[in-house]
Image (cartoon, helix red, strand yellow):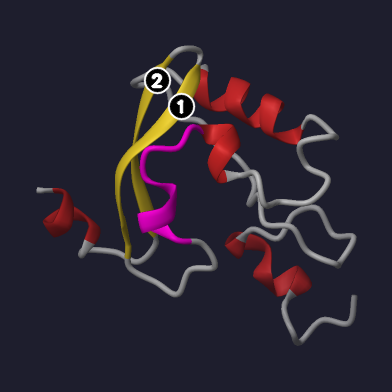
């Protein structure tokens, strides 16, 4: 079922299990060009698979992100902005705001 579902749209899909106060990546499907390895990250916890990201651990970004993710409740939609790190100082690089930061805009 996961393969069928994930082939209906593009993106990175992961099945996470919440245990020991953390999220563990137990399975996944990557349908687009990715700058990370699903085969490498399977079996790791949230902090382990984000370990290569510079400075984010020291600034507490992943501790706050884990708290946000583990507090999402079924049936209560939640929204987050893209967590991609960029060299641009713009904080919101979400697709719905592409017209504000895309290549046609001088930032």
Residue at the image point whose x is 33% and y is 68% from the top = 31
Residue 72 location in percent, x, y?
48, 21
For residue 54, which numbered disc appears in the image?
none
Residue 105 is left or right of residue 50, and the answer is right
Residue 62 is left or right of residue 26, and the answer is right
Q: Which residue is mark 1?
A: 23
Categorize mark 2 by other alpha carbons within 10 Å: few (<14), some (14-19), many (20+).
few
Residue 98 location in percent, x, y?
67, 70
Residue at the image point whose x is 54% and y is 68% from the top = 35
- 77 or 9, which is in the foreground? 9
Asked if disc 2 and disc 1 are in contact, CB closer than 8 Å, the reply is: yes
Residue 82 in magenta stretch:
no
Residue 75 location in percent, x, y?
34, 21
Residue 39 in magenta stretch:
yes
- 48 or 84, which is in the foreground? 48
Q: Earlier in the sequence, mark 2 or mark 1?
A: 2
Q: Which residue is mark 2?
A: 18
Q: What segment carries the magenta color?
A: 37-45
Residue at the image point whose x is 48% and y is 32% from the top = 45
Please identify the quadrant where the C terminus is shown.
bottom right
For label 1, the SS is strand
């Amino acid at each position: 079922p996961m393969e069928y579902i994930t082939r209906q749209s593009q993106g990175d899909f992961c099945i996470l299990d919440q245990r020991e106060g953390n999220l563990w990546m137990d399975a996944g499907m990557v349908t687009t060009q990715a700058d990370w390895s699903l085969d490498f990250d399977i079996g790791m916890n949230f902090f382990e698979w984000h370990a290569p990201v510079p400075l984010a651990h020291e600034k507490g970004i992943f501790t706050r992100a884990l708290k946000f993710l583990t507090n999402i409740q079924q049936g209560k939609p939640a929204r987050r902005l893209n967590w991609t790190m960029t060299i641009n100082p713009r904080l919101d690089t979400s697709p719905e705001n592409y017209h504000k930061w895309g290549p046609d805009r001088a930032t």
